[in-house]
Image (cartoon, helix red, strand yellow):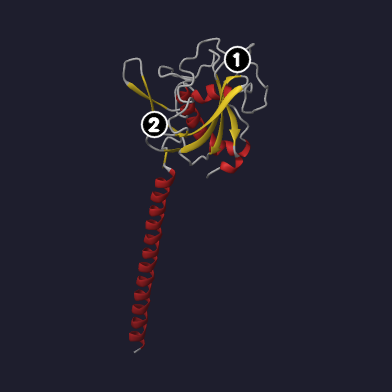
Amino acid sequence: MKQLSIMASALVFAVCASTVHAQQSGVAGFFHRAGAALKTGASQVLGHPNAAGGGATTTGATFRPITPASGGQFQGLFDTWHSGDAWPRASVYFTRWGPSLPCWTARATIWRSARSSHVETFQVCNAPLYIKDDMGGSMQLSATHSASSVTVQMDTAQNIQGITHADTSNTRNAGPNPPHMLFALNFGAEGPALMPQYHEILLRVMYAAGFEDATTKGISNTGGKVLWVQGFDPAGKSN
């Protein structure tokens, strides 16, 4: 009898253990499936993470006008610029932004003279950016992962001093005069997370405005074109 009792107890324990294991497996499977669903949903809302580490990405146009809807003057602003021209100039202020946001909203103040300016709004998206290479093919550009050290060129780009391009030293505003450092801001604690996406968005801003043309492999401000980042709206941050 005692042996039968022991065997019965062992059987009950085995059944219970098996049930608990099944329940645990089910719970683990549930959380695995839920996590996958959440990840998929997030990627659809926020865009796809760039496997190379350049921030969230999306597809479609890199420049998307808002006001005016036709595109205004910012796109191609510097296409007819000539060396020595004092104008146009443009400052860019980001009103919605974030390291996991594939499209940033920007407000550009465009200056045609010291007393004449207007404002345009648009989105700039971290979508694939292509230019023609010297062999007639297409080449994809990336600020974060470029052999030409584009990010360093961005962070060291300076206003060229002269009678037509006086600057405001380190003061950043909408214009008409730019700060001395055109794109290098003090991001503080935001820096490590934000900088990769900032550089990718900024690269697309430059190409949209014609600050860089379709044959340029890196950033060069030696011609004196004036484009700068005014800053970020703190209320526009999106994680």
Whether residue 228 sits left or right of residue 139 in the image: it is: right
Extreme-bottom residue of the structure: 1
Expressed as whole percent of the image width and height from the top left, the position of residue 39 reads 41, 50
Q: Name which residue lies at 55% across and 12% down.
A: 85
Q: Secondary structure at mark 2?
A: loop
Q: Secondary structure at mark 1?
A: loop
Q: CA distance from mark 2 to mark 1?
A: 30 Å
Residue pointed to by mark 1 = 160
Q: Amino acid at mark 1?
A: Ile
Residue 182 in sight here:
no
Expressed as whole percent of the image width and height from the top left, the position of residue 122 reads 48, 34
Residue 75 in sight here:
yes
Expressed as whole percent of the image width and height from the top left, the position of residue 196 reads 50, 33
Look at the numbered discs 2 and 1 and tell me whether their residues touch, using CB distance below 8 Å. Answer: no
Q: Name which residue lies at 42% across and 46% down.
A: 45
Q: Nearer the viewer, residue 196 or 78?
A: 78
Upstream in sequence: badge 2 or badge 1:
2
Residue pointed to by mark 2 = 128
Whether residue 111 sits left or right of residue 204 in the image: it is: right
Q: Residues within 10 Å of mark 1 (few under 14, many from 20)?
A: some
Position of the N terminus by quadrant: bottom left
Q: Nearer the viewer, residue 180 or 190?
A: 180
Where on the picture, by quarter, is residue 152?
Answer: top right
Q: Nearer the viewer, residue 183 or 189?
A: 183
Where on the picture, by quarter, is residue 26?
Answer: bottom left
In the rendered view, tell whether residue 41 sits above or below residue 183. below
In the rendered view, tell whether residue 90 sits above or below residue 224. below
In the rendered view, tell whether residue 113 sits above or below residue 34. above
Q: Nearer the viewer, residue 235 or 220?
A: 235
Expressed as whole percent of the image width and height from the top left, the position of residue 64 reads 43, 33
Q: Name which residue lies at 51% across and 26% down.
A: 151
